[in-house]
Image (cartoon, grey):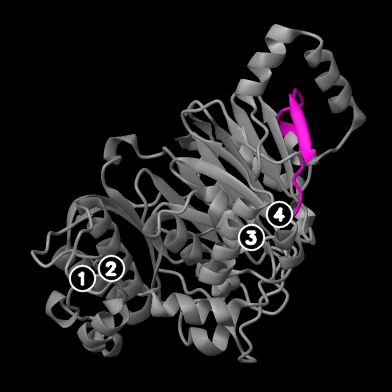
Amino acid sequence: MGRWTGMRNLDTFSNPYGDGKVIDSCGLFGMMSLEGRTFSGSDAIRAMANMHDRGNGLGGGFAAYGIYPDFADHYALHVMFDSAAGRDATEAFIDGTCDVAHDEAIPTRPAAGIGPSPELRRYFITPKNDPCDGCRDPRGVVAVADAAANNAAADATATTASVADPVVEGTCNARTRDEADERIIGIVMTINTKIPDVFALSCGKNMGVFKGVGYPEDIGRFFRLDEYQGYLWTAHGRFPTNTQGWWGGAHPFSILDWTVVHNGEISSYGTSRAFLETQGYCCSLHTDTEVLAYAVDLLARRHRLPMWAVAKVLAPPFWSSIDRMDEAKRRLFTALRVTYPDLLMNGPFTVIIANRHMMVGLRDRVELRPLVAATSGDMLYLSSEEAPIRLINPHLDRVWIPRGGEAVVGRVGTVDVMAGQGRATQPEHRVAAEARSAQPGRDRQQRREWRVGAG
C-alpha cells in the first residue's frame, strides 16, 4: 500500500492556524436526467476538464447516483485506508454492527497526475437491528462513540469488542428507515473519528463518492467513472488557498445519500459547526463544506423541511426584504430565520446539493459566487460556467443565471424544474420564449414542463 499525505493529526494538518476558515475558487458541475435515464460519467469528466483552470490539482471528485442497481437496497459504504491495521479494525467494526452483502476493492486505473493513493474499498451493508432503536436521544452519538471506541483510537488492531455500537437513534416514534439511517450515520462518525488511518467517503444507497488529490478529470479517469452508468452526476475541482490537499478533504462531502459540492467560504462555519454538534454530528474535517452537508441532512431528512425551505434557511431573505412581504410570507420567513439562526450561511458560496431524488443549485444571497443553470429535454445542468454545459450539449432549451438565494430544484420522476426567474445569459432565449408564447398549445405544455416558481 503506497504512502500518501493523509489522515494523521488532522486538527493541525488541515487547520494549522486554528481559525477553521476555508477559502476557495472551485469549479462545480452537475447533470441529471429528470426521467432517471442513466448515462456514463464521461460527460461529467469532460465538463470538469473544460474548467481545469478553476482548480489547482489539490482535489477533485464526483458523486454518482444509480450506479449500484444490484445492491440498491443496501448502503454503499466507500472507505479509504492508510494502513492494514486500520482496515482490520474497520472491518471488524463493520462485521459487528452491520450485515455485509458484498465487499470489494473500488476499481481504479493508473492516471496521469494521480500519485500514491490510499487503499479504496466499498461495502454494501445494512445495519443490524437493535431492540432499543427509536428510544434514545439522537444527540447521543458523540457520547456513545466516545465511550465505546476509546480502545480503537489507541489500538488500530481493535476487535469488534473494543468498538461498541455507535447508535444514533431518532425519537420514540421514528420509523425503521430513519432508525437505519441514524445507525449508519453513527457508524460513519465512529469510523471517521475513532479508528486511525481510515476515512469513510460516502454511505448512501445506490450512489457513491469518488474523490482524491488531483485534477478532477484525472480523478475521474483514475476511478474509471466512464464505465459507470448513473442518472445524476455532480463534480468538483478544488482550489484551496489555506488548507492542504488530502484525499478525504476533496469534494463532494457526503452523509447518507446527500452530497454537496461547494465553491466559496462559509464565514459562519464556527457557529454552524457548534450548533450541528449539539445535534449529534461530529465535524472533524475542518471544512465549511462538511457543515453544509450535515445542515442539509438535518433540515431535509430529520426535520422534513421541503427543499425550498432548506434553501431559505441557508440563504434567507434579508430582514428588510421580509418586512416588505405580505403577512403570510412575513410570518413564514420570520419563523425560519428565528428557528435556524445558526444555519444561515454567511459568506460567498455556491453549492450543488444532491440526493437520489433531486439535484439543487443555490447561490449566496448577494451572488458572490457564480452559477449557471440550463435545461435540454429531460436534462438539467448546473455549472460554475456556461462553457462546459455547451461543450457536452450545444442544444439547450433554456440557459439562465439563478439569482442569489434562489434555489433551482430538479427532481427525478417529474418533468418540473423549480426555479426562480433568474437572468437569461443571451437575448436569444427571450426571443425563443416569445416564439413559444405565440403557440398557445405549446405554451401550456412548456409551463407544465418547466414551471417557474418561487425558489
Q: Which residue is mark 3?
A: 262
Query: Which residue in the structure is indicated by mark 4?
Result: 325
Given residues 129 and 344, the one toward you in this image is 344
The foreground one among 194 and 115 is: 194
Q: Mark 4: few, some, or many residues within 10 Å (few <14, many ≥20)?
A: few
Q: Going 71% across and 28% down the picture, which residue do you hit?
A: 393
Q: Which residue is mark 1?
A: 93
- Quadrant that contains the N terminus: bottom left
Viewer-side label of 4, 3? 4
Q: Badge 3, how many Cα within 10 Å: few under 14, some, many 20+?
A: many
Front disc: 2 or 1: 2
| First to last magenta residue range | 390-405
Q: Horizontal and vertical percent for residue 264?
A: 71, 66
In the image, farthest residue toward the front? 327
Label 2 or label 1, whichever comes before in sequence order: 1
Q: Amino acid at mark 3?
A: His
Give the crowd class for mark 1: few <14, some 14-19, many >=20 residues within 10 Å.
many
Instruction: Please state the horizontal and vertical placement of residue 435, each as a whole percent of the image.
Output: 84, 14
Would you name the residue on which mark 2 appears? 187
